[in-house]
Amino acid sequence: MIKRVLGVGFIGLLCLMVWLTYAFYAKLFTDTVPVTLETSHIGLQLNEHADIKLRGIIVGEVRSVSTDGELAKVDLALKPEQVGLISSDVSARILPKTLFGEKYVSLVPPEGDGGPSLRAGDVIERDKTAVGIEIEKVLNDALPLLQAVDPVDLNATLNTLATALEGRGDDIAATLTQLDGYLKKLNPHLPALVNALERLTQVAGLYADATPDIVRFLRNITVTGNTVVEKEAQLQRFFADVTTLSTTADTFLQHNEDRIIRLGNVTRPILNVLEKQSPAYPCFLEVLADTAPILNDTFRDGRLNINLELITNQPTPYTSDERPRYLDERGPMCASKKYSHPGETPGPYTQDNPGPYLTGEDGVKGDHNKNTRVALPLGRGVAGLPPGVDASYVGTPAEQQVVNSVVGPAMGVPADEVPDLTTLMFGPLARGGQVNVR
């Protein structure tokens, strides 16, 4: 019985020694100040008993790590003698001891006084400065990389890198120093460099948009170049002909220089008149276009088709006091179908609605019966015949026989072979009238 009691006591003493060992390792008997660190998921990479440092001095350790799904909560145990040196506004970063080493908590004191000291139960926030955020991003991105890299390959790479760098510390330091000097000289020019890169981006975009056109141009110029090569002989003859032409033109200009100048001086008034009348050119072309169908109708079927009009009041001759003058200042005018003049009847014009007769300051008095005409129809009972002409005689076979006997010898044909058209045209002339063909 005593042996059993002693055996149980020995086992209990062993368990006590094991627990005491764990307690001393876990520092359960060490007086600490508990605080909480709230950080991003990077805090989950911390191990228990990880160091807590302030300016490189260990001021505590990590006791546990947990998460609520959004933030990582790290329980920190700080040394009581160091708490009085830590401000309540302190922030924390999670850094690796080496490139791939264990993570630890680095406390970042605030700038200035920082307020009262840290107390038990306080919550420390993560460092939200640009540097702290960049460090967290690097660590978050490095974890998947480290998980994907085979340790054997990583060890071989690091050994190779160490071997390559061994004994070259001074050279590397000199290179880094020189690089630092370059960067110091480059830093003042960074804004201009950034501006140049932005403009380069714009220029590159323009070139990218113009690339299809440039390629098409190069393709076309290639075809043009091949054509020039194929037509080299013709081009040489062309250039020789152009040279000859240039020599001839030079000789011509040298011999006729004065004549060309005189020609310019002589034609200048004519060109001035043409320039003045240039607004009438469209109307003139319109009149030509309107007249073409009338001419086609007049000469249709290979024959001349006319309307015979007898004019009783013949144009009167000019008198001695009427001398030509060129003082017309009316400017460009044109009597087309669309012509309209104050006091005149607008077109279109016919025999019953004749176009206006316009005169300028040309030295002529009146129109000399050129615009006032009385048509004398053919046939019996016609008024307005010249004196001594009987209207019943006009157009009769007797008149035709008399006209044929007069016109026949002039035409060199017998009287009975004179065309009727000749009688119609010569008869009014014989009676003192005028024949107009319109």
Image (cartoon, rainbow, N blue to C red):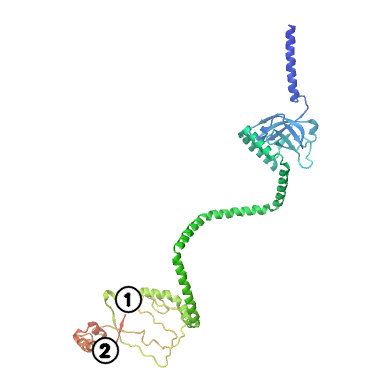
Q: Residues within 10 Å of mark 1 (few under 14, many from 20)?
A: few
The residue sitting at 79% across, 33% down in the picture is 82
Percent position of residue 365, x then y: 41, 89
Mark count:
2
Q: Quadrant of the N terminus?
A: top right
On the question of residue 266 being in view, the answer is yes
Percent position of residue 346, x then y: 39, 76
Frontmost of labels 1 and 2 is: 1
Q: Nearer the viewer, residue 97 or 202?
A: 97
Residue 149 figure quarter: top right
Residue 391 figure quarter: bottom left
The residue sitting at 65% across, 52% down in the picture is 194
Q: Disc 2 marks which residue?
A: 430
Tell me which label, 1 or 2, sits earlier in the chain: 1
Q: Residue furthest top?
A: 1
| Label disc, if present, on residue 295 of the rendered structure | 1
Percent position of residue 266, x then y: 48, 83
The residue sitting at 65% across, 53% down in the picture is 193
Element class at badge 1: helix
